[in-house]
Amino acid sequence: MFQAMRARLRALVCGMRAAARRGAWRDGGMVTSEYAMGIVAAVGFAVVLYKVVTSGQVTAELQDIVKRALNARM
């Protein structure tokens, strides 16, 4: 079993090296659809982060931290 897996892995690596030699992996950058997916993911993360930060418990904790910092003795 391990010999078969090793042979498959070796064939995959050899194929990747051949593709790299041919220049098949040259990439000029992201295409429009990749930009769109990146933007959608970033907006989704921003929405989740906004909901977490503006929730009651997090807001109370942040206010408590600021109050303690302002009342700290130097």
Image (tube, rainbow, N blue to C red):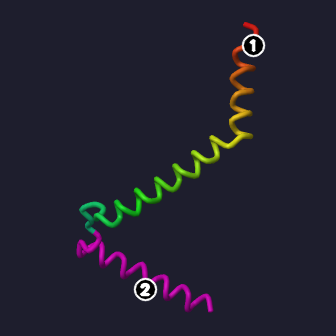
The percent position of residue 37, horizontal first and vertical second, equals 40, 63
Residue type at numbered disc 2: Ala
Callout 1–callout 2 Cβ contact below 8 Å: no
Residue 14 in the image: above or below residue 56 = below
Quarter occupied by the N terminus = bottom right
User: Image check: 74 left or right of 5?
Assistant: right
Picture quadrant where residue 50 is located:
top right
Nearest the camera: 62 or 31?
62
The magenta segment: 1-25
State the image coordinates of residue 61 (x, y, percent, origin top left). Answer: 73, 33
Q: Is residue 25 above or below residue 43?
A: below
In depth, the one of 17 and 30 nearer the eye is 30
Q: Main secondary structure of the magenta part?
A: helix
Give the farthest residue toward the front: 56
Q: Residue furthest top?
A: 74
Q: Secondary structure at mark 2?
A: helix
Magenta stretch contains residue 24: yes
| Alpha carbons under labels 1 and 2: distance apart | 65 Å
Q: Is residue 74 above or below residue 49?
A: above
Residue 45 on the magenta segment: no
68 and 9: which is toward the camera: 68
The reply, left or right, for residue 1 in relation to residue 8 is right
| Near-viewer residue (29 or 58) | 58
Residue position marked by numbered label 1 in the rendering: 72
Q: Which residue lies at the image location 26% right of the left edge and 67% below the top edge?
A: 26
Camera-nearest label, 1 or 2: 1
Q: Residue 11 has which mark?
A: 2
Q: Earlier in the sequence, mark 1 or mark 2?
A: 2
Q: In the rendered image, which quarter contains the C terminus?
A: top right
